[in-house]
Amino acid sequence: MWVIKLLLAALNMKFMISVRNKFRIVFAIIIALFLAGCGKSKDVGGDEYYFTFKIDGQQMNFSDLTSFQMGEKDGKVPLIVVIGVKEPGPLQEQFGWSLVRDGADFKPGTYTMASTDRALDAQYAIKKYTEIYESDNTNDFKVTIESYDKTDGIRGTFSGTLRTEDGKTVKVTEGKFHAHYSTA
């Protein structure tokens, strides 16, 4: 629970930090906690957790570690983060996305950069974090949340274009996930 309080506090920082840098701080905290606290994805009720997608047509499977966290505040859910890691270990390839907006109440549905006023952000990190593709430079990235709860996890789909700071792009298609809920 202290993790969620820390994340919500980061969202409310009063000093000059850009929205993009706030997201990076929150995302870095969450990634570190996931890597420290997650084990391999498990079969639960016969349905394995997964995080799969295509990058420029090439199939990717980041299902070795999958997890999601959500923050709850005043009966609302202003924070949902989902992450998939290709294989365990430090600085491994990872893909994750988040919906972060203080005062929001995210429910199952489809979210885009435009529909959330940039509260949706996605990140694909490769080459030991030396190459990072992000959705904050594009408006076509979208996530559809089909369902989520603490018992059954979160399910949905995602797709769109991600860019590096120097303008390289990748097209994400056929993204789908079922990640378990994590408190770590």
Image: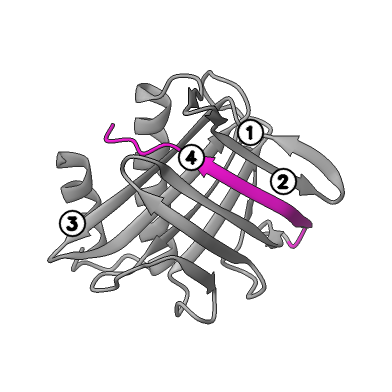
Closer-to-camera residue (156/71):
156
**Is residue 29 toward the left or the right of residue 113 in the image?**
left
Give, as a three-letter code, the residue at label 3: Ala
For the residue labelled by badge 1, is the local secondary structure a helix, a strand or a loop? loop
* Residues at circles 1 and 2 in contact by the CB criterion of under 8 Å: yes
Distance from label 2 to label 3 (Cα)?
32 Å
* Residues at circles 2 and 3 in contact by the CB criterion of under 8 Å: no
Vertical position of residue 54 compared to residue 144: above or below? above
Where is residue 155? Give x, y as percent: 51, 50
Give the magenta part as a residue range. 167-184
Distance from label 1 to label 4 (Cα)?
11 Å
Give, as a three-letter code, the residue at label 2: Phe
For disc 4, the marked residue is 179
For disc 3, the marked residue is 9
* Of marks 4 and 2, the one in the foreground: 4
Q: Residue furthest right?
A: 57
Give, as a three-letter code, the residue at label 1: Phe
Give, as a three-letter code, the residue at label 4: Ala
Mark with earlier residue (3, 4) = 3
